Image: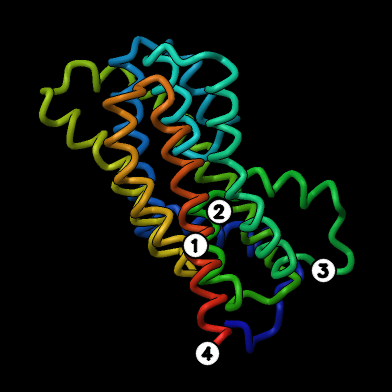
Amino acid sequence: MSDGPEPQSQMHWFLFGMRGLFSLPAIILMLSFVGFAAFTAEAKVPVGEVMFMTGIVWALPAKVILVSSMLSGAPLAATFLAVTLSSVRLMPMVASLVPEIRTARTPTWLLLVISHFIAITAWVFAIERVHKVPRGGRVAFFAGFGATLTTVNVLLVGLVYGAVSVFPPLVSGCLFFLTPVYFLTSLWISARHRVVYWALGIGLALGWLFATIAPQYDILLAGVLGGTLAWWGERMLRRREAAR
């Protein structure tokens, strides 16, 4: 595809990006949002707020952290910090993807707009496919995928919000379980360094511990301490390897 002539119309690549809605990563994410709708319905979060949250706080883990913190009665400052730290991981994704899709003529405001759609699913999807698209059509390609996926998920949670409340508990539980499974598997697959694997493993172990001894701060403590220990351990290992 990249060997052929580049279409003059950006609409071609925008529509081509929209077709990514039928890809496996997008379908898994949509099913996860059905589970998220069940979670928020159980938590009695109004449907309007859930739809707004889906569009504005786009990354699914950040929304799960926000609602979980609300349910656990965590202080506002701790909730804010936990959501912020969970979203910091998106900055390297933006920094790695934008140079791959921009051209010398791409306006900065457009890059700022489409960067809102960069989360794990969109990043993995784009990194795997963007090199097959001519550089002049990459921004339109990613915009088509990101905007479509976001819009569909906003509408999806609004449509299923009332239905999931009458699902059997087992069904709702299975759908919601897709959320952490998707989160963990996506992070694992998209990881490019061993420190990420270490942080995931340590964080999971500490999550159980802090959920028992400090439930109001479990996610924040597990994330900060797990990431710190993983970084320190990986740094010490690199020093040892360099000394050999």
Q: Mark 4 vs mark 3: give the one in front.
A: 4
Answer few, some or many: residues within 10 Å of disc 2's Cα (few below 14, many 20 plus, some between 14 and 19).
many
Residue labelled with disc 1: 125
Of mark 4 and mark 1, the one earlier in the sequence is 1
Q: Secondary structure at mark 4?
A: loop
Q: Secondary structure at mark 3?
A: loop
Q: CA distance from mark 2 to mark 3?
A: 19 Å
Measuring from the top left, give residue 229's x and y in whole percent: 47, 52
The residue positioned 44% from the left and 29% from the top of the image is 65
Identified at 26% across, 26% down, the residue is 212
| Image quarter of residue 57 | top right
**SS of the residue at dot 2?**
helix
Q: Which numbered disc, 4 or 1, marks the residue closer to the eye?
A: 4
Residue 244 is tagged as 4
Spatial CA distance of label 2 from label 1 is: 9 Å
- Work out whether residue 56 or residue 224 is closer to the camera in this orientation and state it: 224
